[in-house]
Image (spheres, rainbow, N blue to C red):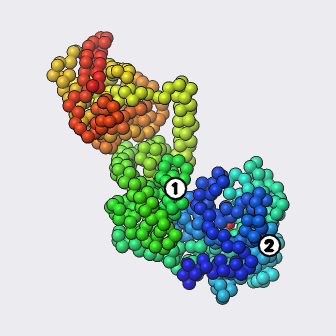
């Protein structure tokens, strides 16, 4: 039986039992801020369970059925193992006061076991054992036994046999689940309660039935294949990847296939890549797929990475055809963007990991600060760092990382609050440029005057920079010229300015410049100028902010000029070099 036939049979079966067939809702739930994506078939029907809407009026029936597309990112770590997916379809029948446990269980039994329908053998079923003063669901157990006296019944508590609510509050209740070939196929929820946001339960006026059966899992057991990835919902997609990359670890290929499918569906429901909400999940999925493709499958990251598989996905799900251009465009743009970061990030990871290994600290754990830096600076998904670390025999502590992320969020909230209160939008554009120029100057001085020169202070206004450093004589004109030339050369090289956050101990090991005697927090950021921290021409402990690129320093002629297109002759100019106090020299410089 093909997956298409299975979908049709499901709907036909429930139609024959008096259900109205409702099309899948969007992956982005309407009017439900409690969840980001549609994660279950019941999502679009929530208002009917709690009496906010009337099914009879809207559908002409109290009983409905659907095939709902769903996205669940909570199981992302399990994807690849054979039965978990981020995108899947859920077959479901629902009743809002129409029928109750007897009919719901009878329908499920008939659909699964009858030779006219799925013709499968049930391994066992599970029912709610009772917990937290909620009584056991003996009614369901009795119904099952009356249908099949030999059925194997397992009982579990709230964790496994009680469902909902989705989000903070909502309908919920005990479930009975059907297992075939060792996997959970169908979850039949009896919504008897409403859970309030304070976690207390109250009985629902109208009792509802909410069932969910993963299409991919059902197809797997019907088609008698080892994993969901071997079903006709995946086989062609998987082989289109294999035909490009060859014989590579199959679990990784499966993850890429799963993610590309979720990506295509999310884009087709109108989501655009961004740094918040749905767009952020989309970005994470694209980046995760790319990283896995690059790192574990080892294939190059040109358009072939996604072109053939996405074509195959669209052929497998013709409803995506309408949004084909949009899908390719969005994936194309994001992959291009991430490609640049990716290479740098992987280099950085290897370097950091190597440095850490070289320290022979006998520690197997990658510090949370480094993990944090990779996530925030390079957009590395956390799970990926976990996987790459494992490859090198290292571990990362998820909890520590999450704590740090939390702290970071609180801090950045506090700092934007502060800026807001101070009435300042942060720093002016010129100050930011002078700030980056100061880093270039410091490094140039070190190269021309030697490592004895150390920074004593710096001061920036929108008009100029001032830099104090210890040195025991006046600089010669030649030295001044060399320093100036070096800074201008770096400006003309259009070098990227990057930031990496790590703990102080780690940061000191990178050899980044910092002011002696200065108090730094436990966590510092290093700004480095160049493609990677390892190869950077300049690296310094610094709070920022900085220009994105040294080429930006040449841009003083207004927005119509693009400084990166032309070579600046002389942008940076030393206007004064004088004694500031004993053994300390002071330079004033401008960007012309
Ligand atoms: N809402 C339940 C689930 O998601 C049954 O549909 O499993």
Closest to the camera, between mark 2 and mark 1, is 1
Q: Quadrant of the N terminus?
A: bottom right
Residue 99 numbered tag: 2
Asked which secondary structure carries label 2, the reply is loop
Q: Quadrant of the C terminus?
A: top left
Image coords of residue 470 (percent x, y): 29, 19
The residue drawn where x is 35% and y is 70% is 244
Name the quadrant containing residue 556. Answer: top left
Left-right relation of 234 to 104: left
The residue drawn where x is 82% and y is 72% is 139
- N-terminal label among 2 and 1: 2
Image coords of residue 460 (percent x, y): 37, 22
Image coords of residue 288 (percent x, y): 45, 57
Asked which secondary structure carries label 1, the reply is loop
Q: Residues within 10 Å of mark 2 (few under 14, many from 20)?
A: some
Q: Is residue 495 above or below residue 301?
A: above
The residue drawn where x is 54% and y is 63% is 86
Residue 271 numbered tag: 1
**Residue furthest toward the bottom?**
115
Front residue of this view, candidates 491 and 227: 491
Q: Is residue 557 above or below residue 86?
A: above
């Amino acid at each position: 039986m093909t997956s298409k036939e299975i979908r049709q049979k499901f709907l036909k079966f429930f139609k024959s039992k008096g259900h109205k067939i409702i099309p899948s809702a969007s992956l982005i739930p309407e009017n439900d801020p409690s969840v980001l994506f549609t994660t279950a078939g019941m999502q679009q029907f929530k208002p009917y369970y709690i009496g906010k809407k009337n099914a009879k009026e809207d559908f002409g029936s109290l009983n409905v059925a659907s095939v709902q597309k769903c996205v669940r990112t909570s199981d992302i770590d399990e994807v690849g193992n054979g039965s978990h997916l981020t995108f899947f379809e859920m077959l479901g029948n629902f009743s809002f006061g129409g029928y109750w446990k007897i009919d719901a269980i009878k329908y499920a039994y008939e659909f699964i076991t009858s030779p006219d329908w799925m013709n499968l053998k049930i391994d066992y079923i599970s029912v709610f054992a009772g917990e937290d003063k909620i009584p056991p669901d003996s009614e369901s157990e009795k119904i099952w036994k009356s249908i099949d006296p030999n059925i194997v019944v397992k009982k579990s508590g709230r964790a496994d046999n009680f469902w909902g609510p989705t989000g903070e509050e909502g309908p919920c209740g005990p479930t009975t689940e059907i297992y075939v070939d060792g996997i959970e196929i169908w979850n039949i929820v009896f919504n008897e309660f409403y859970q309030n946001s304070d976690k207390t339960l109250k009985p629902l006026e109208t009792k509802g039935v909410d069932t969910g059966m993963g299409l991919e899992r059902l197809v797997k057991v019907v088609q008698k294949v080892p994993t969901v990835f071997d079903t006709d919902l995946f086989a062609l997609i998987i082989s289109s990847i294999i035909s490009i990359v060859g014989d590579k670890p199959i679990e990784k290929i499966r993850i890429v296939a799963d993610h590309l499918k979720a990506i295509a569906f999310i884009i087709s429901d109108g989501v655009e890549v961004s740094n918040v909400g749905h767009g952020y999940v989309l970005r994470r999925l694209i980046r995760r797929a790319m990283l896995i493709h690059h790192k574990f499958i080892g294939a190059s990251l040109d358009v072939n990475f996604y072109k053939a598989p996405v074509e195959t996905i669209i052929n497998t799900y013709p409803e995506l055809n309408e949004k084909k251009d949009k899908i390719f465009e969005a994936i194309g743009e994001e992959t291009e963007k991430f490609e640049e970061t990716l290479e740098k990030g992987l280099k950085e990871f290897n370097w950091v990991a190597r440095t850490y290994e070289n320290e022979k600290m006998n520690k197997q754990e990658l510090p949370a600060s480094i993990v944090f830096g990779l996530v925030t600076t390079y957009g590395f998904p956390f799970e990926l760092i976990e996987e790459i670390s494992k490859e090198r025999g290292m571990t990362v502590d998820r909890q520590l990382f999450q704590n740090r992320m939390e702290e970071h969020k609180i801090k950045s909230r506090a700092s934007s609050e502060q800026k807001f209160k101070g009435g300042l939008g942060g720093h002016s554009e010129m100050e930011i440029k002078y700030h980056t120029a100061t880093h270039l100057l410091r490094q140039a001085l070190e190269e021309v005057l030697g490592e004895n020169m150390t920074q004593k202070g710096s001061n920036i206004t929108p008009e100029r920079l001032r830099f104090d450093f210890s040195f025991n004589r006046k600089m010669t004109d030649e030295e001044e010229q060399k320093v100036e030339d070096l800074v201008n050369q770096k400006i003309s090289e259009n070098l990227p300015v990057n930031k990496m956050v790590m703990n102080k101990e780690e940061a000191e090991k990178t050899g980044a410049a910092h002011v002696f005697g200065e108090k730094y927090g436990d966590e510092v950021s290093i700004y480095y100028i160049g493609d990677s921290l390892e190869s950077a021409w300049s690296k310094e402990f610094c709070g920022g902010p900085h220009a994105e690129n040294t080429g930006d320093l040449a841009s003083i002629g207004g927005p119509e000029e693009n400084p990166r297109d032309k070579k600046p002759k002389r942008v940076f100019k030393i206007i004064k070099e004088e004694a500031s106090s004993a053994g300390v020299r002071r330079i004033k410089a401008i960007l012309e």
